[in-house]
Amino acid sequence: GRAGRVGAALAAALALAAGAVDAWVYVGLYPMAHGWLAAAGLGAAGLAGALGAGPRLAKGAAVILPLAGAAPWLAPAVVGSSWVARQQVQARGTGPARALAQRLPATAAPITDQPCTFPAAAPPPAGGQAKGAPVILLTIDALRGDLPLAEVMPKTHARLAGATRFDRAYAAATRTTRSIYALFTGLYPHRVRFEPTRVDGQDAPVVDPGQPGFADPQSWKMRTPTPLNDRSPTLPALLEAAGVPTFTSIAYVYFRPHFGVTRGFGGVSIGPYLKTNRDNRGVTSGALTERLRRYVAEAPAQFFLWAHYMDPHRPYDAYGDVPADAPLQARYRSELRRVDDALEPLWADLAARGVLDRAVVILSADHGEAFGEHGASFHGTSVYDEQARVPLWVRAPGGAGGAVAAPVSLVDLAPTILDLLGVAGAPAMDGRSLAPALFGAPLPPRPVLTSATLNGHRLGLIDGDHKLMADTTEGWIALYDLRADPGERHTLADAEPTTRDRLLCLLRAAGVPLGAAGGGPP
């Protein structure tokens, strides 16, 4: 009857609508979100069909409704690199889920007018401009590179007066363990050994080779890439070998020494983690600062101190006068203010002991954070600037200060610190020393890399004003002019084929895996 026809039509419309939403959002959205959309679409379709279908339509509905529900999720795979997909890329800067922006070619187009060689970085020159100085490196979880530090962390910003600000700094990866370990090794993540790791009930690592039992990428204790069996030289180990004491206090399970990220530190305090963050949801900044202050009170004249402040990580516990039900971004910013307030006693101690003025002070982040840009949330899923770009402030005794516009990477920090401290004989790294820029010298242009490995494998290469993105899981590439299009909304992959192919060739020359769809490191 009429009710049956209306019910069937409504079921198909609901399924198609939910599928269209799923196809439109960025492929990098967490897998669970796509599952929710699928369940919502199929559930709504089934409910509408059940309500409208009479007995005579029951058999037909049993066949038609699942097909109607499945069609929207099958359609993008059929669409491929069609006009619809290209228009979505042009309009939004993204491709629909499981569809291609522009197909990633099997080989790079030949480049005849310029060499296709990814420039190697020379070993740190060990200039020693800050020889004997203590080094304080602080990283803030999920602190976006586009946020004005004076606004979101005003006390810390004031303590960094005279620092050099690198306005286009990129994390080597948009996941914490890969990013921080790249910082400590000076090597891009594809050059070291990462293994998908989970945590057992005793906080011990269990390597996950991909069996079905370990298939939840959403859980913070499941399938996190760690370098637990990597043996690359690390910054703290090199400093310890040179006689510089190193110390860190941690509030995150994957920073415990047996996971590999903090390998080489002479001292690792796990107290803040045990006290505040066994469930990965705790407020940790106060406990971290308390432990760091105790170290500083007894520290030698020279030391290397690193701490990672976790609190801005989701679920964003509101701080200060921000209500608990405030929008996500308001709660996230309040967490940054929490870190800022927690750091102030540490800054005050360092200043009172005369350490702050003679120290190399570095502030950065492990990655950024997305709030709906390009259809994604949180981090780890893309190499768009909201996730890949980070703040970087470096203050060295006698430094010139100012701002640097050239793209740089967090893999540059290890060679920079070794250079400033005059540690000779360090191994060759992917990063280069930024020390010349701290004293007013220009930085020669050099491309930098970034990557994302949650729910797929995505790569970014930034060269001057251009960024090339390649998704090896879905098989698409895109090109953006970051000066003209800072929001990365309009791909130029078709309009500028020469630039596209040159950057793709550089990406291959860097040795980054661009293998078959579904490939890529963890």
Image: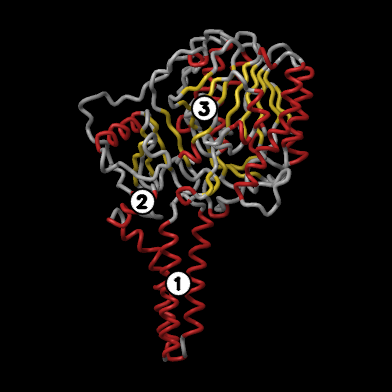
Q: CA distance from mark 1 to mark 2?
A: 24 Å
* Residue 201 in sight from this viewpoint: no
Question: Which label's residue is closer to the chain start, 1 or 2?
Answer: 1
Q: In terms of secondary structure, where does tag 3 sit? A: helix
Residue under pointer 2: 91
Residue 346: x %, y % from top left: 74, 25
Q: Is residue 134 left or right of residue 8?
A: right
**Cα separation between marks 3 and 2:** 31 Å
Looking at the image, can residue 85 be seen? yes
**Residue visible at 40% across and 73% down?**
68
The quadrant holding residue 355 is top right
Question: Any mark on residue 187, and which?
Answer: none
Give the alpha-carbon distance from disc 3 to disc 1, as whole Å.
46 Å
User: What is the three-letter code of the residue carrying label 3?
Assistant: Leu
**x 40%, y 42%: residue:** 488
Q: Which residue is mark 1?
A: 14
Circle on res. 410: 3
Q: Position of residue 149 (x, y in %)?
A: 59, 32
Q: Amino acid at mark 2?
A: Ala
Q: Is 353 situated left or right of 408 in this image?
A: right
Decide which of 234, 420 is in the foreground and name it: 420
Question: What is the three-letter code of the residue carrying label 1?
Answer: Leu
Give the mark toward the camera: 3 or 1: 1
